[in-house]
Image: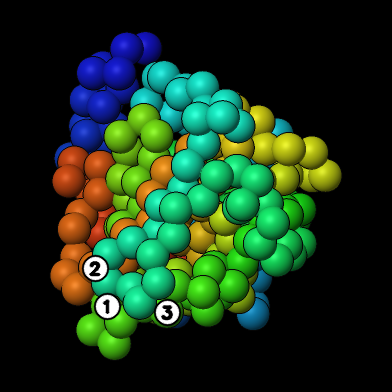
Amino acid sequence: MSRDKLIEAKQQWAREGRLLTGKIPGSTTGSSPVAEGPPGTGRLPPGQVLVRDWPVLDLGAEPNVTPQKFRLDVDGAVANRLSLSLDEFMALPQTESVSDIHCVTQWSRYDNRWKGVAARTLLQIVQPKPDARHVILHSFDGYTANIRLEQFDQPDVFLAHEWEGKPLSRTHGGPVRMLIPQLYFWKSAKWLRRIQFTLSDHPGFWEQRGYHNNGDPWLEERYD
């Protein structure tokens, strides 16, 4: 499917509210109870289906970000800006993590093993300014995603470069991708190029095309 047709198909999903169940944990709407609740009571958000593989979803083109081409800029409303080569990024403190991922297209995958740089490690280095409120993620292919600073500042948020003990493949966003497990996976930008701290919100690629600005799978925030 071409990029334009893919985008139009996803926008149509948003217009139709495709995959929405309305079975929000704790809600009285919907015709049947939710099998799994929010974190702490269960693992599968409403409307999701558990898979064992890792489906590939992107805009139809995978940039070839070689080690020589890689550059990660961290800038905006921060005290200390960074511009890192891949070697410099890999020299930052490394951490391993295990988390579940949930895609807006209905699949979820449990117990993914990651290695990378914790977002909180990066925050300690760059020191966001007191009035910083949002984080805009930019990819090498021009993709963007927006989150709030408090969503970035979580213990399970990572700049991941390994998955299941192997370097993150180009197909899945390597050499470095964002990992934000508590939000739908479109927020976890592939082929990470820039992390921009801002005072105001700037809706990302899919948020401008009908997707929910927040993207909490437990609240089934698929679309606006």
Q: Locate residue 28 relative to residue 99 in the image: left or right.
A: left
Label 3 with label 2: CB-CB less than 8 Å: no
Mark 2 belongs to which amino acid?
Thr
Tell me which colouring the rendered structure shows.
Answer: rainbow
Which quadrant would residue 224 be assigned to in this image? bottom left
Q: Which residue is mark 3?
A: 127
Label 2 with label 1: CB-CB less than 8 Å: yes
Q: In the picture shown, does residue 122 fall above or below 185?
A: below
Callout 2: helix, strand or loop? Answer: strand
Callout 3: helix, strand or loop? Answer: loop
Name the N-terminal-most of marks 3 and 1. Answer: 3
From the top left corner, tell me how far across and down residue 128 is, in percent: 36, 78
Front position among marks 3 and 2: 3
Callout 1: helix, strand or loop? Answer: loop
Q: Which residue is mark 2?
A: 198
Q: Locate residue 146 relative to residue 58 in the image: left or right.
A: left
Farthest-out residue, right: 165
Q: In the picture shown, does residue 191 fall above or below 148?
A: above
Mark 3 belongs to which amino acid?
Gln
From the top left corner, tell me how far across and down residue 103 is, in percent: 49, 46
Specify few, some or many for label 2: CA neighbours under 10 Å numbering under 14, 14-19, or 20 or more.
Answer: many
Name the N-terminal-most of marks 3 and 2. Answer: 3
Q: Residue drawn at (59%, 72%), measured in percent from left and top?
A: 121
Name the N-terminal-most of marks 2 and 1. Answer: 1
Numbered mark located on residue 132 in the image: 1
